[in-house]
Amino acid sequence: MSDDWLQLIPTDPELVPATGAITAARAAFEVLVGPADEVLVTVTDHVCFIDAGANHERISCPRCEAEIDQAWWVRALDAASDAAFADLTVHVPCCRARLSLNDLVYDWPAGFARFVLEARNPDVSELEPAQVAALAATLGTPLRVVWTHI
C-alpha cells in the first residue's frame, strides 16, 4: 500500500521554531488536514533532505531555468550528505551560479530541514495559501509544502 505525506518545512533549513509555536501549529495543522493516519512533528539534530518520493519529476535552476542533470544532482546531494548537510552551496552546471541545493526548483517541491510538520494520508488534497500563511505566522517562519508519495 502506498502513502501520501503532507510535509511543511521552514524555508531556512536550520530553523527550528520555538516549542510553544510548534505545539500551536501542530494543533492547527491537525484541524486543517482532517482525519489523517498520523500527524507528526520531527526535529532532527542535523539538516535532512525532505523529498517528494515517487512524485519527483525534475529539478531546475532558479537562475537560468535549465533542467539540472540528475546524475550531477545525485553527486551534489551525496557530497552534501557526507558533510551532514552543513553546507548546501553548489555551483550549478548550467550557468555556474553559486546556489544552495535548497533553492533549486524541485518539481514536485522538496527541500532541506531540521523541522518537519507532517501528516500521513491527510484528508485534504492541498492546503490553501492562506492556511499555509497562517501556519507560517504561528511558527514564525516562511514554509515550503512538500508532498511525498511513497
Image: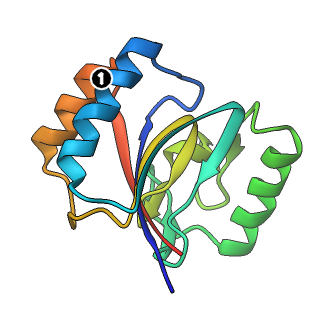
Question: For the point 36% across and 17% down, which residue is it?
Answer: 21
Q: Residue 66: horizontal and vertical position, in percent?
A: 48, 66
> Looking at the picture, which amino acid does disc 1 mark?
Ala
Q: Answer with left or right where residue 141 lies relative to residue 105.
A: left
Q: Quadrant of residue 24?
A: top left
Q: Is residue 64 above or below residue 138?
A: below
Q: Answer with left or right where residue 119 lies relative to residue 95.
A: left
Q: Quadrant of residue 10?
A: top left
Q: Residue 35: horizontal and vertical position, in percent?
A: 25, 59
Write down the residue under mark 1. 24
Q: Nearer the viewer, residue 88 or 141?
A: 141
Neighbourhood count class around disc 1 (C-alpha, 10 Å): few under 14, some 14–19, many 20 upward: few
Q: Is residue 132 above or below residue 94?
A: above
Say what secondary structure mark 1 lies in. Answer: helix
Quarter holding the C terminus is: bottom right
Question: For the point 67% across and 59% down, which residue is it?
Answer: 93
Q: Answer with left or right where residue 11 lies relative to residue 81.
A: left
Q: Nearer the viewer, residue 78 or 91?
A: 78
Q: Residue furthest right?
A: 82
Q: Is residue 15 above or below residue 34?
A: above
Question: For the point 15% across and 45% down, which residue is it?
Answer: 129
Q: Residue 110: horizontal and vertical position, in percent?
A: 49, 55
Q: Residue 128: horizontal and vertical position, in percent?
A: 13, 50
Question: How many marks overall?
Answer: 1
Question: For the point 17% across and 30% down, which residue is it?
Answer: 134
